[in-house]
Image: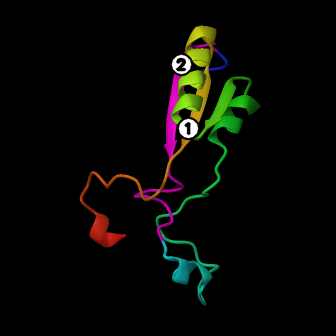
């Protein structure tokens, strides 16, 4: 819809690889007997949200640093076209807003 109507909207995805911090398994769990089983909070860790926008004709950005984010924001705002900025963040950064850390 954004591309069809050329709406100058910039969507920012803070991508931590899932919900509630993505895959926070320990190295022992990741390499252990159940290594093929993803954590229940993981969701396609390398999801290309930015490429989905490009597939529909908008502009997509993949960023991982504050400088890259600043550049992507500047470029996308000045272009005034639909864009998605996929900001990859550390799944261990921050805490859940719902106080669910004991459930992860």
Please give left or right for residue 57 compared with residue 98 in the image. right
**What residue did someone put label 1 on?**
65
Where 1 sits versus 63, above or below?
A: above
Instruction: Determine the main secondary structure of the stretch shown in magenta.
Output: loop
Q: Please give the name of the residue rendered at 35% of the width and 52% of the height, measured from the top-left corner.
A: 94
Left or right: 55 in relation to 80:
right
Horizontally, is 24 left or right of 71 in the view? left
Residue assigned mark 2: 9
Q: Is residue 53 left or right of residue 99?
A: right
Looking at the rendered image, the quarter that the C terminus falls into is: bottom left
Q: Is residue 80 magenta?
A: no
Residue 18 coordinates in the image, percent (x, y)? 50, 56
Q: Residue at x 32, y 71 (%)?
A: 103
Label 1–label 2 contact, CB within 8 A: no
In this rendering, is residue 35 above or below 62?
A: below
Q: Position of residue 36 (x, y in %)?
A: 64, 79
Residue 85, percent across and down? 58, 32
Q: Nearer the viewer, residue 9 or 45?
A: 45
- Which region of the structure is painted magenta? 5-24
Residue 70 picture location, percent across and down? 53, 24
Q: Looking at the image, can residue 45 be seen? A: yes
Find numbered disc 2 in the image and state the secondary structure of the residue it sits on. Answer: loop
Other residues around mark 1 within 10 Å, as few (<14) / some (14–19) / many (≥20): few
Residue 1 lies in what quarter of the image? Answer: top right
Disc 1 from disc 2: Cα separation: 22 Å
Here the colouring is: rainbow
Tell me the tag on residue 33: none
Q: Label 1, secondary structure: give it.
A: loop
């Amino acid at each position: 819809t954004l591309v069809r109507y050329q709406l100058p909207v910039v969507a920012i995805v803070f991508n931590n690889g899932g919900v509630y911090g993505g895959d926070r398994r320990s190295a022992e769990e990741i390499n252990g007997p159940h290594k093929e089983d993803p954590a229940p909070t993981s969701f396609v860790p390398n999801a290309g949200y930015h490429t989905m926008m490009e597939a529909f004709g908008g502009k997509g950005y993949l960023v991982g640093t504050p400088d890259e984010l600043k550049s992507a924001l500047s470029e996308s705002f000045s272009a005034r076209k639909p864009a998605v900025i996929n900001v990859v963040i550390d799944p261990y950064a921050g805490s859940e807003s719902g106080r669910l850390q004991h459930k992860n």
